[in-house]
Amino acid sequence: MTADLALIWPELILTIGGLITLMLGTFLGDRQVGIYQLSALLTLAAAAAAVVALFGVETTVFSGTLSVDGFGGFAKLLIYAASFVCILIAPRFFSGGMRAEYPTLIVFAALGMGIMASARDLMTLYVGLELNSLAAYVLASFMRTDERSSEAGLKYFVLGALASGMLLYGISLLYGFTGTTDFAGIAAAMGGQLNIGLIFGIVFVLAGLGFKVSAVPFHMWTPDVYEGAPTPVTTFFASAPKVAAMALMTRVVIDAMGPALGAWQQIIIFLALASIILGAVGAIGQKNIKRLLAYSSINNVGFMLIGLAAGTQQGVEGVLTYLLVYVVTTLGAFLVVLQLRDADGNQIESIPALAGLSQRRPGLAAAMAVFMFSLAGIPPLFGFWPKYLVFEAAVNANLVPLAVAGIVASVIGAFYYIAIIKMMYFDDKSDTEIPAGGGAIVEDAVITASALWLSVIGYLFIPVLAVVSASAAAVLF
């Protein structure tokens, strides 16, 4: 037991740090927001340092229910980094309304997401997923006086409960027909002849996980929750939980269901194509920038699933690289949205209000253009590279029709990204006044760094990314 505890330092640090932040909030009230924020930031930084210190360790703990490896470490670093940024940017948005619960909930959500990324047993998978979800439900409805936020929290809770029920039913079927909840034991059972019970178990488990990655047809909550939740919370939902859910789905299908490739590959291919097409078409008529980014998120999940559908190490490497680039792009895009305020300081979410933004905030418009082009995967911006990797993996896995369909659908998706850029640079200024300046130093720094990395500069890091992603993906094979 002691040896196991020495290998889960990231989780222990998050647990202790989260409890300290919670107790500080209990005793000091909502007056000392800076203290709670600092406590949570230090906790996440220390957890990330612990993950780095454990790189190179490949083992399991607690009777094989949790894995300590490079794949989980890669996902955890992305999760902690995204959570760090979402805590950092929050006080300015809430402008006095931020409470101690916000950083505390994000820390505990990060704890759950870390467990999701390392789970090697169906029980720990569910514990991590629910720990993240319970924090997320509260975060979605964090602004108690805002009807949209309350509605977003309620929708997320109801649909999340439905997805959890589907996942639990799938878990019970897998346990009933394999006699174990351990991924290795399930993989051994699936090495033989698949019966109808196992097939149904695979379907229900992937349906439950499909909700967490917001893949079609389990995407229905995403646009409403993204629009209704406070913008820092939406930024969080669009980044860290996506990494955790995609890492969990990857580990489940490769680690636990690997021998049943023919059964789950068809499901993943359907989820990928449906997500890409609906994410592209659904975004075209949107007038709210957060709803548009929600459909963009669904669209990008589809591209990640193309890499996963390959079922190869090359495909998983593509998924990991895609996750990294996607998180950076999404954080940058939502930080730009966070800076869009009118003369009275109210948040601007209307897309038509962006007309002529290049004349008022040229730097912000340029950064948004980089993020939009990158999300569309248009070269030479770095967002093109992960799309190339997942398509290459699909072609090498003899899934040429899937790759062709993905490429064609990506052309459709590029339409609404380019439409925003056209609006910012070529349309007449909107009536909504967007004052120059007003961005916080931290937000400006993150936006600038993200935009620079997503330019051609990102290609300089390909050799490093290739080594890191290959090392992490090799764990599952």
Image (cartoon, rainbow, N blue to C red):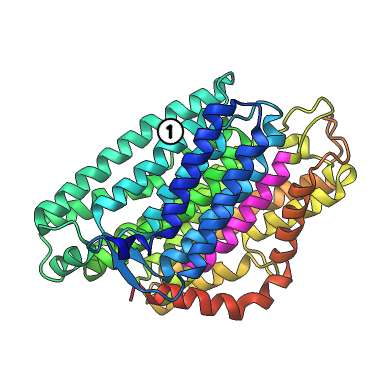
Q: The C terminus appears in which quarter of the rendering?
A: bottom left
Q: Left or right: where does residue 289 sit relative to residue 154?
A: right
Q: Position of residue 324 (x, y in %)?
A: 56, 63
Which residue is located at x 47 percent, y 31 percent? 138
Q: Find out whether residue 327 is within the magenta segment.
A: yes
Which residue is label 1 attached to? 156
Q: Which residues are magenta?
A: 319-338
Can residue 438 be seen here?
yes
Question: Is residue 424 placed above or below 189 in the rendered structure?
Answer: above
Residue 267 spot, x, y in % from top left: 31, 57
Q: Is residue 223 visible?
A: no
Quadrant in the rendering for residue 130: top left
Q: In which quadrant will I find the N terminus?
A: bottom left
Local crowd size for mark 1, using a 10 Å CA cut-off: few (<14), some (14–19), many (≥20): many
User: Principal SS element in the magenta part?
Assistant: helix
Query: Which of the two residues, 322 or 1, is positioned nearer the viewer here?
Result: 1
